[in-house]
Image (spheres, helix red, strand yellow):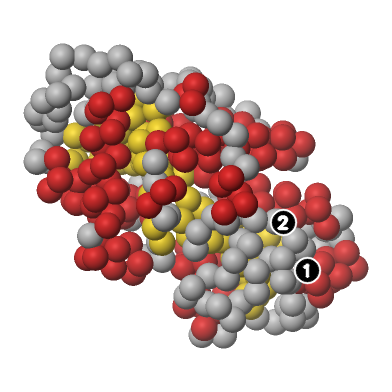
Amino acid sequence: MRFSRRQFLHLPSAAAVLPTATSVGSAESYPTRPITIIVPYPAGGPADAIARIVGEGMRMNLGQPVIVENVSGAGGTLGVARVARAAPDGYTLSIGQLNSHVFSGAVYSAPYDLLRDLAPVALLTTNPLMIVGKRDLPASNLKELIGWLKANPDKGSFATPGFGSPSHVWGAYFQAKTGTHFQFVPYRGGAPALQAVVSGQIDLTCLQASDLLPQVRSGNIKAYAILADTHWGRATDIPTVDEAGVPGLYMPFWHGLWAPAHTPREIVSKLNRAAIEAADDPSVRQRLGDIGQELFPREQQTPEALAALQKAEIEKWWPIIKAANIKNE
């Protein structure tokens, strides 16, 4: 899965958030000690797995240990705050995604600014989301699902991995675009949300496609659409949301790497190069593919591309979040 050329050509400039050329005396010799990647979620999730897989390759490229530390809580804001407050010396990094580095700024009162207090390093991987329903739901495709929801207002249920999660935000976006209404039911993570649909307790959910595909193939749930403008390579038979009749309701679930703001450009360049070279290793690609992650094209793995994408996502999703009144009090 990749973002379309159209999407990237129209991303706004984000040069203001990139590191300056000002350097420090240690930039040339960097790194001289271990580097820590902060994962803003518990161990075992996609961000944690990506950090460990890519971090191992970065260790080999940089010649220093890369330690992965999980600092979870408050929708990822605790872990991101740790990096935003860290010294801008390249030794404390943040791995994150659409939730932690876009949505959290609108849902939570975070003690940092996502664009001003972080320096983008590299755009890493993406994995599409998929909307699915329980096996005995009457609708056989997305258009029929919309008809069923309209005929049964507020009777449908939609499982999310938590308040303000991508599933929750996309569900609110779907409601606004289709004129449907259903009840959101938050769970503590994607696994219990999926199990609620598999067991038939809940009608719908929207999660990372790689987590849903085994249950789809087993016939335990129905797949309605991939939330992207291109087919997913692992399941080309599942229609895109455009093909399913609701064009434009995309939500690619991407991951990136950040450093604290004001990290010297030379250090950011070294980190970017180390991450890209790590991801380019065939064994790393395979391990990422095994967990459903696909790499961005090389030209889209730059700090500039991540900065522009993050800014564009904030401009798109924050008004949607605020309109839906998704706010942690």
Quadrant location of residue 251? bottom right
Classify 10 Å Cα crowding around label 2: few (below 14), some (14-19), many (20 and above): few
Which residue appears at 66% of the width and 40% of the height?
317
Tell me the CA gap for discs 1 and 2. Answer: 10 Å
Which residue appears at 24% of the width and 28% of the height?
267
Left or right, residue 129 beside residue 116: right
Q: Is residue 126 above or below residue 310?
A: below
**90 and 99: which is toward the camera:** 90
Tell me the SS state at disc 2. Answer: loop
Quadrant location of residue 143? bottom right
Whole-percent x, y for residue 255 in the image: 43, 48
Which residue appears at 62% of the width and 42% of the height?
10
Classify 10 Å Cα crowding around label 1: few (below 14), some (14-19), many (20 and above): few
Whole-percent x, y for residue 239 in the image: 65, 74
Which residue appears at 33% of the width and 30% of the height?
259
Q: Is residue 91 above or below residue 7?
A: above
Residue 26 visible here: yes
Where is the C terminus found, in terms of image quarters?
top right
Location of mark 1 (residue): 245
**186 and 12: which is toward the camera:** 12
Q: Is residue 77 above or below residue 165?
A: above
Quadrant location of residue 20? top left
Location of mark 2 (residue): 248
The amino acid pointed to by label 1 is Gly
**317 and 106: which is toward the camera:** 317
Tell me the SS state at disc 1. Answer: loop
Residue 321 visible here: no
The amino acid pointed to by label 2 is Gly
Whole-percent x, y for residue 140 in the image: 74, 81
Whole-percent x, y for residue 179 in the image: 86, 55
| Marking on residue 116 | none
